[in-house]
């Protein structure tokens, strides 16, 4: 299945916003695909995103839309480095692996 578009649902005030934004920008350039950024679109995440233990969607989440219209989460939590800071490079690797394995 070929990726058509990256969709980042985020909040500009979230501590991981910049890390997710960097991952989205880097993947968009590397894969040469369109990107869309949605701000606090909880209804979209209710339909397509991951939810917490109480069934509530959370921010930020990076999803991919395939050519057949399927929307799948590819990064919902940013990995941390040894200094316990967000690691966009590891996040990019994780998302890229999920994108490559979408069927």
Image (spheres, helix red, strand yellow):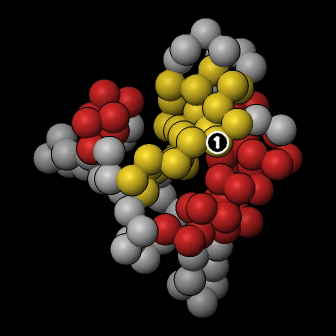
Left-right relation of 55 to 85: left
Q: Which residue is nearer to you in this view: 50 or 3?
A: 3
Q: Which residue is nearer to you in this view: 81 or 57?
A: 57
- Residue 65 vertical placement versus 94 (above, below): above
Whole-percent x, y for residue 51 in the image: 28, 43
- Residue 68 vertical placement versus 9 (above, below): above
Whole-percent x, y for residue 70 in the image: 53, 17
Circle count: 1
Q: Which residue is nearer to you in this view: 47 or 86?
A: 47
Q: Which residue is nearer to you in this view: 93 or 48?
A: 48
Left-right relation of 103 to 30: left
Residue in the picture at 55% in, 14% down: 69
Does residue 51 show up? no
Residue at the extreme top:
68
- Residue 72 vertical placement versus 66 (above, below): below
Residue 35: which quarter of the image?
top right
Whole-percent x, y for residue 53 in the image: 20, 48
Residue at the extreme left:
54
**Secondary structure of residue under mark 1:** strand
Left-right relation of 60 to 54: right
Residue in the picture at 59% in, 69% down: 19
What residue is pinned by disc 1?
A: 35
Quadrant the C terminus occupies: top right
Residue 18: which quarter of the image?
bottom right
Does residue 12 show up? yes
Residue in the picture at 61% in, 9% down: 68
Quadrant the N terminus occupies: top right
């Amino acid at each position: 299945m070929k990726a058509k578009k990256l969709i980042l649902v985020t909040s500009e005030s979230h501590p991981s916003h910049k890390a997710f934004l960097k991952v989205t920008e880097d993947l968009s350039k590397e894969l040469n695909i369109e990107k869309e950024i949605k701000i606090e679109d909880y209804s979209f995440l209710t339909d397509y995103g991951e939810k917490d233990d109480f069934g509530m969607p959370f921010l930020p989440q990076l999803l991919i839309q395939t050519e057949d219209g399927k929307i799948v989460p590819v990064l919902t939590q940013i990995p941390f480095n040894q200094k316990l800071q967000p690691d966009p490079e590891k996040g990019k690797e994780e998302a890229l692996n999920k994108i490559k394995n979408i069927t």
